[in-house]
Amino acid sequence: MHVVYNKPSVQIRMAIPNDASSIALVLYQSFAEYRSSYTDEGFSATTPTADQIQSRMKEGPVWVALHENAIVGTVSAAPKGEALYIRGMAVLPTARGQGVGELLFRHVESFASAQGHKRLFLSTTPFLARAIRLYENLGFRRSSEGPHDLFGTPLFTMLKSLSLPISEP
């Protein structure tokens, strides 16, 4: 069983295939203001199509944040050995500043711990300052690991170690 984090009007749930178009729209709208900072290929990779999102659903979990039954945020993850790779994290501009991103991350972290993952990692770009602050506030630290470029768009990796629950003797 996975814990569902709630704010008074926000619920996190596992995405279903019918959510793919809404998720694609959330990703596009969330990154549109940064479009000029990406290369064309980098922006396309950051804003996958509904078909690409449905493929991601086969690779690992995808969650959505709902406010009044509308999808206002999303995050997906893919297992990579002992780590869980976080990708496709986005919150609509109109829903930012309300804790939606933190709720999504807390949900992913709970899932990762329950699955026995030892760390979380993600890739981000230097111009996503608000997102980077959120990641740092949630315990992520920059790493020299991982790719430094997404089709010509600058990129860096952030990591967070997960503490495993202490078992009773």
Image: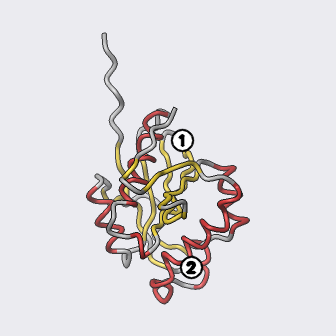
Q: Position of residue 38 (x, y in %)?
A: 50, 83
- Mark 1 touching mark 2, by CB under 8 A? no
Disc 2: which residue: 43
Q: Position of residue 53 (x, y in %)?
A: 66, 62
Q: CA distance from mark 1 to mark 2?
A: 27 Å
Q: Residue furthest bottom?
A: 36
Question: For the residue carrying disc 2, how many other residues have a C-alpha within 10 Å: few (<14), some (14-19), or many (20+)?
Answer: many
Q: Residue furthest right?
A: 51
Residue 125, above or below 57? below
Kind of residue sitting beneath label 1: Gly
Q: Position of residue 131 (x, y in %)?
A: 36, 68
Q: Which label's residue is closer to the chain start, 1 or 2?
A: 2
Seen from the viewer's position, the closer of residues 44 and 155 is 44
Q: Find residue 135 and report its image quarter.
A: bottom left
Question: The C terminus appears in which quarter of the rendering?
Answer: top left
Q: Residue at x 53, y 80 (%)?
A: 152
Colour scheme of this structure image?
secondary structure
Disc 1: which residue: 81
Q: Residue at x 49, y 73 (%)?
A: 149
Report helix, strand or loop for mark 1.
loop
Seen from the viewer's position, the closer of residues 165 and 73 is 73
